[in-house]
Image (tube, rainbow, N blue to C red):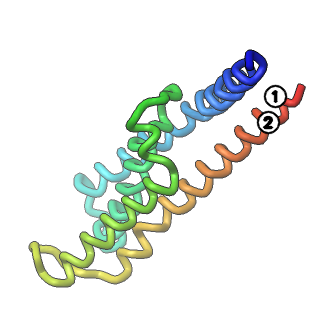
Amino acid sequence: MMKVIQKKLKNQSTLQNQHNKYAPYWAAALVIFWAVGILTIWLDSGGFWKGYVLDMVGPAWNYILFRGLFTNKANNAWTRFFTPKRTVTIFLLVCVAFETAQYFKLYDATFDPWDFLAYVSIIIPLFLIDIKIIRQSEKQAKEQSAY
């Protein structure tokens, strides 16, 4: 029983170390996406800039924020709820809801089917990177616990 507990603690420690190792990179991405999003309001750089860039970076910075990727690993109700798959699913559903509301003119905005591509253009790669890091961490933890 004691060995099982020790292995579990070692696995958690390995997963935590891997998460913390990548946290500064996620934090940098968060700041960059946020800054670019803010710049879409301050700078007028044409149609693509005004029409799609915020739709690209908004879900991306929020994915990093909601997943807690930018900070030390935490194990709490929030982080257990916002798993990678659940987070990306919720965010994509919200994006579809916004576009649907625009389509039905529920608020003053312009429906654009290209927004769907903008929404997924960054958040899906972030999701895939997140999953890859988690799998890599779990693999490393299993290898270490075998010793």
The front one of 14 and 46 is: 14
> Element under label 2?
helix
Along the viewing direction, whichever of 37 and 136 lies nearer the viewer: 136
Question: Whole-percent x and y of residue 7?
Answer: 75, 24
Q: Residue at x 51, y 51 (%)?
A: 84
Q: Is residue 38 left or right of residue 57?
A: left
Q: Is residue 53 above or below residue 115?
A: above
- Numbered tag placed on residue 142 in the rendering: 2
Residue at x 23%, y 55% (from the top left corner): 41
Asked where in the image residue 59 lies, by quadrant, the reply is: bottom left
**Residue type, numbered disc 1:** Ser
Name the amino acid, label 2. Answer: Lys
Where's residue 34, x and y in %?
Answer: 36, 46
Question: In the rendered view, would you say 45 is above or below 42?
Answer: below
To which residue does mark 1 refer? Answer: 145
Structural crowding at the residue carrying mark 1, measured as other residues with C-alpha within 10 Å and reported as few (<14), some (14–19) or many (≥20):
some
Return the x and y of residue 77 as percentages of the image width and height. 39, 35
On-image quarter of the N terminus = top right
Label 1 and label 2: CA atoms lie apart by: 5 Å
Task: Answer with left or right where residue 64 lies relative to residue 11.
Answer: left
Callouts 1 and 2 close, C-beta under 8 Å: yes
Q: Is residue 10 above or below residue 26?
A: above
